[in-house]
Image (tube, rainbow, N blue to C red):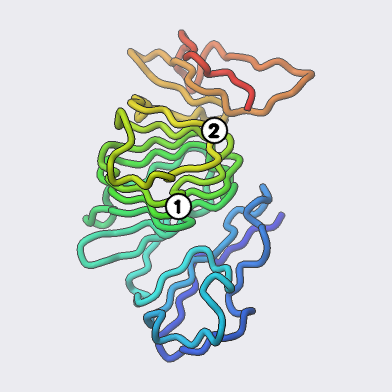
Amino acid sequence: MFTRQLYILHIPSPIVNISSTIFASWVGYDYEEVISYFPAAVVVFENEQKDMILANNSVAVYEWGRYAFGYTSSQILQDDHFVYLEKLLTMEILAIKNTSGKVTIPSMYLSKPVSRINQFSLIGHNGGVNFIEISNGVEFISTYAFYASQVLRVVTVPLSVSAVNYLGFYGLSNAEIHVKASQKPSNWDSTWFDEVKGVIWNSQLEDGLVSEDGVFIYLITQNQAKIFKYLGNWSSSAPVIIPSSVDGYPVTAIAKGAITLN
């Protein structure tokens, strides 16, 4: 099994010449492979981009995906789930690390508000993330923040998100974007998503849970489970079995559209 272990590559200020296209290159389309859990390291330069020698190359030539200029190594932080960029007053998400099932993007980290989800924070399968909950308080979603995952099924977007850049959600053909707002906020780009399964406005899915086996999204009401979405595989020879209980809660209801073939 192929698993890249490098999460962060920090380049100190004495290094200014990176004119070789081999340097730190993210090779090919590993993000499309299920076994490639972390397809692109976060490349962070202490120098500003204008102070670096890139020869005749643009940043795009190097295919870093996740990168930042002008930050010290002490400003790049991580926990078990995320790589963060610490700014004066806020934190930003630079990458979602190896994980699976449901991921909750926090509104606070080390007593600072998490304000932004940066470019390519999620690339492809990334270990099998199928449900992303964005906590209320996050304000900005960058271009290509969520990119080309066929595993991702649900993203919840709270009212606090005031701006989504061009194609903040892209290539998520099996994902529904559940937005708390009743309509597109004025500061969201007119093309904030493309190639996603669907957008659900005025959604109330913030309390959705992923079952321990990763097969269902469900909601809890009065200690009873309502199946909201089936996330498992489909087979022409085996039925989809709705359990009598999920994670210890009795299943008493199935939401409209919960069992649909993608």
The CA span between labels 2 and 1 is 17 Å
Secondary structure under the numbered disc 1 in the rendered image: loop
Quadrant housing residue 205: top left
Where's the N terminus, which quadrant? Answer: bottom right
4 shown above or below 46: above
Q: Residue at x 56, y 31 (%)?
A: 214
Three-letter code for the amino acid on which mark 1 is drawn: Ala
User: Pointer 2: what residue?
Assistant: 197
- Image position, residue 153 (x, y; %): 53, 34
- Compare marks 2 and 1 and give the one earlier in the sequence: 1
Secondary structure under the numbered disc 2 in the rendered image: loop
Three-letter code for the amino acid on which mark 2 is drawn: Lys
- Image position, residue 193 (x, y; %): 46, 43
User: Pointer 1: what residue?
Assistant: 145
The mark total stands at: 2
Q: Residue at x 46, y 9 (%)?
A: 253
Q: Residue at x 58, y 63 (%)?
A: 5
72 shown above or below 232: below
158 shown above or below 192: above
Q: Is residue 49 found left or right of 213 in the rendered image? A: left
Q: Residues within 10 Å of mark 1 (few under 14, many from 20)?
A: many
Please identify, in this view, whether the residue under mark 2 or under mark 1 is nearer the observer: 2
- Image position, residue 189 (x, y; %): 37, 47
Q: Is residue 205 found left or right of 26 in the rendered image? A: left
Task: Give residue 14's mark.
Answer: none
Quadrant housing residue 239: top right
User: Is the residue under label 1 in contact with that under label 2 (CB below 8 Å)?
Assistant: no
Q: Residues within 10 Å of mark 2 (few under 14, many from 20)?
A: some
